[in-house]
Image (spheres, grey):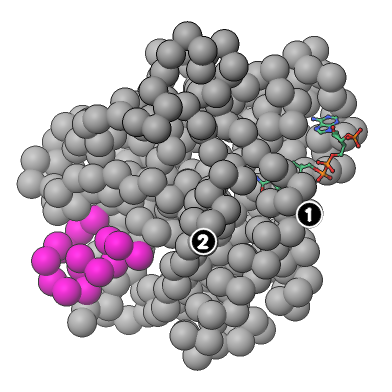
């Protein structure tokens, strides 16, 4: 089995910024409530003419430049998203065409906020077994397109963005352990009820606003802390490492209180946790992807560092991986 590592990263955040003060004018909320309950101050929103593929293409181009590769060098493109351009074809096909990645296999993964970790792990298998050389993995979301802007319980949480990574064979280090899991018995805790084959869009579903994200947030909070904690423990054990060996944790950015509760349980100090939730909100699969990119670009991850990615999301699904940089 070949060793597989990340050789380039990129991100794209849409230009428009929606602040908590803006939200105060839209729903019955306050900057104080949002900040203290979630840690979010602002989030980026895609323009009307931007689709998930547009964000992904920009993040992908940036990652290709970082890796000093061209689209034609890619053998595989995996897009993690719950807000694809359309139900079919896969958003990965649209990205493949734009990047000129003519020989790349392309498909999407629906693993919500754990999507980037799921996609990294799948891409790793292709390269480790020698069936692909270079893979592009992107978490891209326009959650604003499935957010109910009249529901204060959810609309303050989400944002839009895309983050990308190029995976290839490396001589040392790379992804040293990964762990994915799921529990479909609580699939309805966070979902978009209508718009699929179970409940196709109709006037009734539109009137009942069922094509937007619905969430039992309070219940999910506790489950999220346990899922992220357990995923980190399993993956560290698989890697033969302890919490103190980790140089930086890139957690899914759903709520700063969830992240800090997990960090406390695992014994991580705050300086070991990378956050971009304050300026981006929860961007589902794009959260860990952009946070990883930003941490690299800011010099917070150096050669030889041990990085832990840890995520959970709708499904419920969870995933974690340990990367030696
Ligand atoms: N502004 C002001 N008040 C709000 C509000 C908002 N945007 N949203 C909810 N509230 C109110 C509620 O109506 C409730 O009022 P009540 O006590 O009069 O009924 C009160 O705030 C407390 O609600 P609660 O749900 O208990 O708050 P919370 O501390 O659990 O925070 C979340 C809510 C959603 C921020 C939190 O539960 C959370 O982050 N859950 C996990 C969500 C998640 O991880 N989602 C993504 C998964 S990938």
Q: Which residue is mark 2?
A: 183
**Can you tell which of label 2 and label 1 is closer to the viewer?**
2
- Magenta stretch: give its range: 121-135
Residue 230 vs 195, above or below: the answer is below
Real-space Cα separation, disc 2 to disc 1, in angstroms:
23 Å
Q: Which residue is mark 1?
A: 257
Residue 8 vs 308, above or below: the answer is above
Q: Position of residue 249 (x, y in %)?
A: 60, 66
Mark 2 C-beta to ligand 1 under 8 Å: no
Q: Is residue 129 magenta?
A: yes
Task: Place residue 51 in its image quadrant.
Answer: top left
Left or right of 84: which side holds 204?
right
Total labels: the figure holds 2
Label 1's element?
helix
User: Does any portion of residue 85 appear in the rendered image?
Assistant: yes
Label 2's element?
loop
Which quadrant is the N terminus positioned in? bottom left
User: Upstream in the sequence, badge 2 or badge 1?
Assistant: 2
- Residue farthest to the right, as pictured: 32
Q: Position of residue 56 (x, y in %)?
A: 36, 36
Q: Position of residue 256 (x, y in %)?
A: 74, 51
Say which residue appears at 53% left-offset and 49% top-offset: 187
Mark 1 C-beta to ligand 1 under 8 Å: yes
For disc 2, the neighbor class at 10 Å (few under 14, some 14 to 19, many from 20) is few
Which quadrant is the C terminus positioned in? bottom left
């Amino acid at each position: 089995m070949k060793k597989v590592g990340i050789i380039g990263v990129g991100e794209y955040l849409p230009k428009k910024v929606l602040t908590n003060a803006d939200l105060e004018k839209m729903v019955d909320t306050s900057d104080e409530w949002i900040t203290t309950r979630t840690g979010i101050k602002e989030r980026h929103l895609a323009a009307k003419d931007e689709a998930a593929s547009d964000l992904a293409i920009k993040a992908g181009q940036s990652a290709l430049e970082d890796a000093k590769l061209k689209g034609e060098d890619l053998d595989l493109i995996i897009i993690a998203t719950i807000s694809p351009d359309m139900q079919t074809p896969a958003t990965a096909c649209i990205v493949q065409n734009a990047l000129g990645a003519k020989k790349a296999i392309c498909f999407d993964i629906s693993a919500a906020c754990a999507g980037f970790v799921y996609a990294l792990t799948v891409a790793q298998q292709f390269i480790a077994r020698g069936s692909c050389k270079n893979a592009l993995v992107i978490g891209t979301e326009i959650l604003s397109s499935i957010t109910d802007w009249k529901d204060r319980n959810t609309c303050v949480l989400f944002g839009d963005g895309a983050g990308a990574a190029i995976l290839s064979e490396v001589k040392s280090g790379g992804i040293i352990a990964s762990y994915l899991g799921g529990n479909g018995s609580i699939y309805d805790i966070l979902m978009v009820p209508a718009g699929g084959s179970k409940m196709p869009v109709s006037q009734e579903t539109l009137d009942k606003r069922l094509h937007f994200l619905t969430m039992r947030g309070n219940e999910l909070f506790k489950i999220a802390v346990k899922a992220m904690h357990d995923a980190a423990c399993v993956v560290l054990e698989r890697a033969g490492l302890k919490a103190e060996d980790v140089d930086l944790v890139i957690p899914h950015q759903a709520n700063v209180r969830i992240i800090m509760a997990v960090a406390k349980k695992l014994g991580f100090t705050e300086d070991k946790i990378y956050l971009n939730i304050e300026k981006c909100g929860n961007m589902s699969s794009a959260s860990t992807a952009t946070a990883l990119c930003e941490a690299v670009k800011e010099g917070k991850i150096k050669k030889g560092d041990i990085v832990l990615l840890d995520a959970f999301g709708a499904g419920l699904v969870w995933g974690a991986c340990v990367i030696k940089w």
